[in-house]
Image (cartoon, helix red, strand yellow):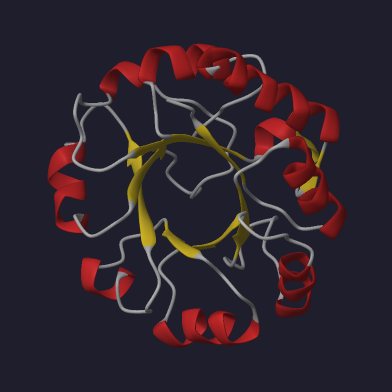
């Protein structure tokens, strides 16, 4: 099975184009004001306009108000929603688009119990726990904490880089991997060479 690849935290049109040209299956736009990778409406529209067919555009939110999500959807075309906070299952599924639900993994958390109510999600994204950050922190977690045979496809995130993504794919065998800080030259600015190396690291394990 080929592991899919999402490049998240895109803030520039040129980075989106590079990610797609290098083989990314999806790009992620962050709609969370505290994040250094947050994009405004005009930025988002420009990036989305540059994405060719058959590449998934994902919008990331953290405990948003309903009108915030609706405003984003009126302003640009998204294919998939990603929720990183404590949003209720009904809220996540209330926008007429498929969604994925993120969980921040730590040893004392019951992932199955937390994620089971989100059975309608298209996938469950597993990220490193951080007290203040919701993704993009550059920290990994112990992949052995991931339960076997989760009910939804697993999207592995958290501290992935070109150097460790091959090992991550070998150990976890996720449906997809999600990277942001691991392929950056600076916060919100992607490095095309790092993206290429990351994608090669994934594809070398699933070819």
The quarter of the image holding the C terminus is top right
Quadrant hosting residue 153: top left
Question: How far across and down, in percent of the image, does residue 124 sit?
Answer: 33, 45
Q: Is residue 10 left or right of residue 79?
A: right
Quadrant hosting residue 37: bottom right
Give the residue drawn at x 29%, y 57%: 121
The quarter of the image holding the N terminus is top left
Question: How far across and down, in percent of the image, does residue 157 sit?
Answer: 48, 35
Q: Considering depth in this image, is 154 or 71 the residue closer to the camera? A: 154
Question: How far across and down, in percent of the image, does residue 81 sit?
Answer: 45, 64
Vertical position of residue 83 compared to residue 138: above or below = below
Question: How far across and down, in percent of the image, does residue 164 sit?
Answer: 58, 15
Give the residue drawn at x 59%, y 32%: 138
Q: Is residue 51 left or right of residue 160?
A: right
Q: Considering depth in this image, is 141 or 130 the residue closer to the camera? A: 141
Q: Is residue 56 left or right of residue 131?
A: right
Vertical position of residue 165 compared to residue 82: above or below = above
Q: Is residue 108 left or right of residue 14?
A: left
Quadrant hosting residue 155: top left
Q: Please count the marks in the image.
A: 0
Give the residue drawn at x 71%, y 53%: 10
Vertical position of residue 52 compared to residue 133: above or below = below
Q: Considering depth in this image, is 149 or 142 the residue closer to the camera? A: 149
Extreme residue toward the right, this view: 14
């Amino acid at each position: 099975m080929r592991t899919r690849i999402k490049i998240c935290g895109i803030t520039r049109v040129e980075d989106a184009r590079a990610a797609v040209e290098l083989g990314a299956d999806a790009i992620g736009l962050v709609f969370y004001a505290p994040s250094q990778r947050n994009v405004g409406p005009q930025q988002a529209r420009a990036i989305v306009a540059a994405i060719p067919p058959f590449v998934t555009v994902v919008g990331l939110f953290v405990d948003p108000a309903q009108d915030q999500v609706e405003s984003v959807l009126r302003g640009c075309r998204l294919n998939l929603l990603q929720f990183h906070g404590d949003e209720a299952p009904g809220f996540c599924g209330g926008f007429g688009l498929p969604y994925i639900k993120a969980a921040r993994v730590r040893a004392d958390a019951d992932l199955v119990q937390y994620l089971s109510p989100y059975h309608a999600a298209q996938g469950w994204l597993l990220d490193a726990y951080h007290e203040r950050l919701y993704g993009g922190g550059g920290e990994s977690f112990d992949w052995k904490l991931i339960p076997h045979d989760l009910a939804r496809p697993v999207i592995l995130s958290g501290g992935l880089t070109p150097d460790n993504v091959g090992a991550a794919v070998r150990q976890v065998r996720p449906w997809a991997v999600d990277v942001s800080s691991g392929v950056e030259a600076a916060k919100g600015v992607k490095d095309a060479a790092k993206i290429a190396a990351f994608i090669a690291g994934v594809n070398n394990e699933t070819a």
